[in-house]
Amino acid sequence: MRIGELAKRTGTTTRTLRFYEAQGLLAAQRSPNGYRSYDEHDLRLVAEIRALQAAGFSLADTRPFVACLRAGNPEGDACADSVEVYRRKLTEVETCLAQLADLRADLTRKLAAAMAREPHPTCTVQETP
């Protein structure tokens, strides 16, 4: 398939596919007239990259998954390097959740303190032009 069809089937743009190619994540075959040509395996690679990015992974994080698929594995997370990326990402998410929990607790305390002071109902913030 040509680049336009791959873009359509993966829900992305030709520009994005060219970027993936420039980053070494996707390798197109070239026809004699210079057109890029892709197959079903490339469709799977792009789907994996897009799914990982939708889950919050950086483009760099997708590299082990792409390499795992290129090595012939049925899933991009069948390799140890991919599993390590999952572990690292999970640690990042857990850190963010802990920070959000701290923020929530702080805001809850501040709200309780403000409500205990019984704020004046006519006290409003004036917007400046």
Image (cartoon, rainbow, N blue to C red):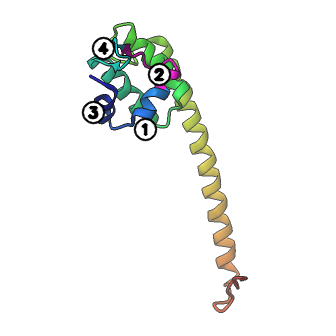
Residue position for label 3:
9
Residue position for label 4:
74
Q: Is residue 52 visible?
A: no
User: Closer to us: mark 2 or mark 4?
Assistant: 2
The residue type indicated by label 4 comes to Pro
* Quadrant of the rendered image containing residue 40: top left
Q: Is residue 52 magenta?
A: no
Question: Is residue 13 positioned above or below 60 on the image?
Answer: below
User: Closer to us: mark 2 or mark 1?
Assistant: 2
> Which mark sits nearer the N-terminus, 3 or 1?
3
> Which mark sits nearer the N-terminus, 4 or 1?
1
Q: CA–CA distance between discs 2 and 3?
A: 17 Å
Q: Is residue 22 magenta?
A: yes
Q: Residue at x 63, y 46 (%)?
A: 99
Secondary structure under badge 4? loop
Q: CA–CA distance between discs 4 and 3?
A: 20 Å
Q: Is residue 44 left or right of residue 96?
A: left
Residue position for label 2:
21
Q: Nearer the viewer, residue 61 or 101?
A: 61
> Which mark sits nearer the N-terminus, 2 or 4?
2
User: Closer to us: mark 3 or mark 1?
Assistant: 3
Magenta highlight range: 20-29
Q: CA–CA distance between discs 2 and 1?
A: 19 Å
Q: CA–CA distance between discs 4 and 1?
A: 20 Å
Image spot of residue 32 (x, y percent): 34, 11
> Which mark sits nearer the N-terminus, 2 or 1?
2
Q: CA–CA distance between discs 3 and 1?
A: 17 Å
The residue type indicated by label 2 comes to Glu
Q: Residue at x 30, y 16 (%)?
A: 41
Question: Is residue 40 positioned above or below 9 on the image?
Answer: above
